[in-house]
Image (tube, rainbow, N blue to C red):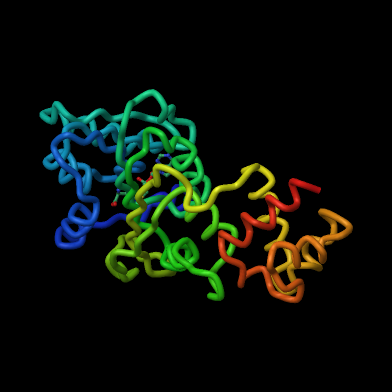
Amino acid sequence: MAKKHLGQNFLFDPSILKKIIEAAQISYEDTVVEIGPGPGRLTKMLADNAKKVIAIEIDRDLLERLKGDFIAYKNVELIHGDALEFPFEDIGKFKVVANIPYYITTPIIFRLLDTKKSLKTMTLTIQKEVAERIIAKPGKKDYGVLSIMVQYYAHPELKFIIPKEAFRPVPKVDSAVLHITTLDKPPVFVKDENLFFSVVRTSFSQRRKTIANSLKGLCEDIKDILVKSGIDPKRRPETLSLEEFARLSDNLKKE
Ligand code: SAM
């Protein structure tokens, strides 16, 4: 019986699992971390294609079953625990391939991006609408904090859609496979990353307002700073590019 509160929607179709493995572009030199191996079907394919697989599963019942199934697999390490608390920094360079439990999608992506020196790529099966928000470009309705945070650290690509009927039990929404490659350096330079992210978060806290109205709590002469940054104060936050947010936060830093 699947445990709904743990986001247990399992994938069984071998052709879909094969497509995920292809999208992940893993090789026999790679250490792959799988978050939530569940019944272990993807885990087996990963073990056949990677040097080492570290599979972290929070559900002790599933883990006990996996231990038996993987007894002959010398390159698979099964770990019981919460992936959000796993010390990713201690395992050297790694790739992530996972069908992510929906309730940890955003925190796990941010946690993984935080390990950026060791993380090479992540191939994540996540809710389609979250994937669309991650890849969204300025001017699109899905563009927001999540798009900017991920695109600052990485290059996300939507590889393919998995219809909800492919999962057991069937969830409410379709999923998408995202391949995210971390960048050696961000696509824009900012003087103060904390300020940059704070400007982005504050801007989107009131999407319907103009950028000047959203940010007026940050600084009294926000209109002047926007104009100095080449941004019309009447624009909406979702029309600003990463470069424009960077310029704006650098000019706010000077004030
Ligand atoms: N990989 C399997 C598949 O594709 O069929 C299972 C994917 S299922 C969507 C998510 C899995 O993550 C479940 O096995 C669930 O028990 C596990 N899980 C849920 N929360 C977790 C957490 N915080 N840390 C590690 N595993 C978790």
Residue 98 location, x and y as percent? 32, 48
In the foreground, 47 or 160: 160
Q: Please give left or right for residue 75 compared with residue 251 in the image.
A: left
Name above or below for residue 189 compared with residue 117: below
Q: Which residue is drawn at 69% across and 73% down?
A: 236
- Residue extending farthest top: 90
Q: Where is residue 21 in the image (x, y as percent from the top left)?
A: 19, 52
List x then y, in percent, for residue 218. Answer: 82, 54
Q: Which quadrant of the structure image shows residue 52?
A: top left
Tag count: 0
18 to the left or right of 7: left
Q: In this view, does 2 lie to the left or right of 238?
A: left
Residue 103 image offset from top left, x and y in percent: 50, 51
Residue lying at 30% horizontally and 35% vertically, measured from the top left: 94
Q: Which residue is farthest right? A: 220
- Asked which quadrant contains residue 201, the reply is bottom right
Q: Residue at x 85, y 57 (%)?
A: 217
Asked whether 231 or 75 is in front, the reply is 231
Q: Which residue is drawn at 27% across and 66% down?
A: 166
Q: Is residue 194 above or below residue 125?
A: above
Foreground pick, 2 / 138: 138
> Does residue 169 lie above or below 192 as drawn?
below
